Image: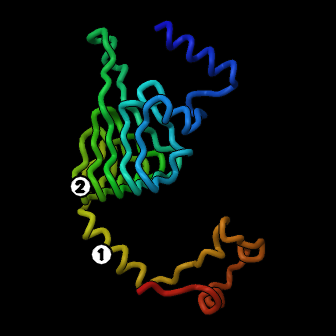
């Protein structure tokens, strides 16, 4: 209890909230992160239990994902907080504002849909969504559907992104037939 109070005082002195803690602080607290992960800076990570969180290689996080390795709702009932490991395996995508709770493992090559609340383990190679998250399809079926949808669509190239230097003119264009002819590509 005293350590939590001291931690909160340190955060107040430094002018940071739990949500603003740096990735370095989480890593120092024991967070394990594999290679080629992206999006973690926009996540809310359970700093007090970061040592229970393990993230594999090639995991992509959309903004404002919550990773929680503890559950204080048990304290009133049994006088103790439940803490448990949270693991995300290799090659996963975690959608915006998804919440992954303590004791959950997300299997390799899985996708967690935006806004999902993951309360139970997610098998490998599936897509889950909802509250609570449930399997909606397997990864291969989803992949086939995305490829089929994209094969019929034109895709904007990187010049239509912030990192690609989108211009004010491109932001306001609405002549999509000409855009298709100029800089869009078809996926095969």
Which quarter of the figure has residue 102?
top left
Residue visible at 25% across and 62% down in the picture? 137
* Circle number at residue 176: none
Local crowd size for mark 2, using a 10 Å CA cut-off: few (<14), some (14–19), many (≥20)? some
User: Does 111 sit above or below residue 13?
Assistant: below
Q: Quadrant of residue 172?
A: bottom right
Residue at the right extreme? 168
| Residue 75 point in image, percent of width and height | 33, 13
Judge whether 150 appears above or below 2 on screen. Answer: below
Residue 13: image location, x then y, percent:
69, 18
Q: Residue at x 33, y 11 (%)?
A: 76
Task: Depth check: give the residue in front, 86 or 58.
Answer: 58
How would you rate the neighbour count of disc 1 (Cα within 10 Å): few for under 14, some for 14-19, many for 20 or more? few
Name the quadrant containing residue 175. Answer: bottom right
Q: How many marks?
A: 2
Give the residue at mark 1. 144
Task: Tell whether 11 sits left or right of 28.
Answer: right
Measuring from the top left, give residue 92's x and y in whole percent: 36, 55
Among the two numbered marks 1 and 2 on one chain, the one whose residue lies closer to the N terminus: 2
Q: Residue 35: image x %, image y %? A: 43, 53
What sort of colour scheme is used for the picture?
rainbow
Where is the C terminus found, in terms of image quarters?
bottom left
Q: Nearer the viewer, residue 145 or 103?
A: 103
Residue depicted at 41% across the width and 84% down the height: 151
- C-beta proximity under 8 Å, tags 1 and 2: no
Query: Between tags 1 and 2, which lies in front?
Result: 2
Cα separation between marks 1 and 2: 17 Å
**Location of mark 2 (residue):** 124
Residue at (63, 18) in percent of width and height: 10
Element at label 1: helix
Most foreground residue, 107 or 150: 107
> In what element is the residue under mark 2?
loop
């Amino acid at each position: 209890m005293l350590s939590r109070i001291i931690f909160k005082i340190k955060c107040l002195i430094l002018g940071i909230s739990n949500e603003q803690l740096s990735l370095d602080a989480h890593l120092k607290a024991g967070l394990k992160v594999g290679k080629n992960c992206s999006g973690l800076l926009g996540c809310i990570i359970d700093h007090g239990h970061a040592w229970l969180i393990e993230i594999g290689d090639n995991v992509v996080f959309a903004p404002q994902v919550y990773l929680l390795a503890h559950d204080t709702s048990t304290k009133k009932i049994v006088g103790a907080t439940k803490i448990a490991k949270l693991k995300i395996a290799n090659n996963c995508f975690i959608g915006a504002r998804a919440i992954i709770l303590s004791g959950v493992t997300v299997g390799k090559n899985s996708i967690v849909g935006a806004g999902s609340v993951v309360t139970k383990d997610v098998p490998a190679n599936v897509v889950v969504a909802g509250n609570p998250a449930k399997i909606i399809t397997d990864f291969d079926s989803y992949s086939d559907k995305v490829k089929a949808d994209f094969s019929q669509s034109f895709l904007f190239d990187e010049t239509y992104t912030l990192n690609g230097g989108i211009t004010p003119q491109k932001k306001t264009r609405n002549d999509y037939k000409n855009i298709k002819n100029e800089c869009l590509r078809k996926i095969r």
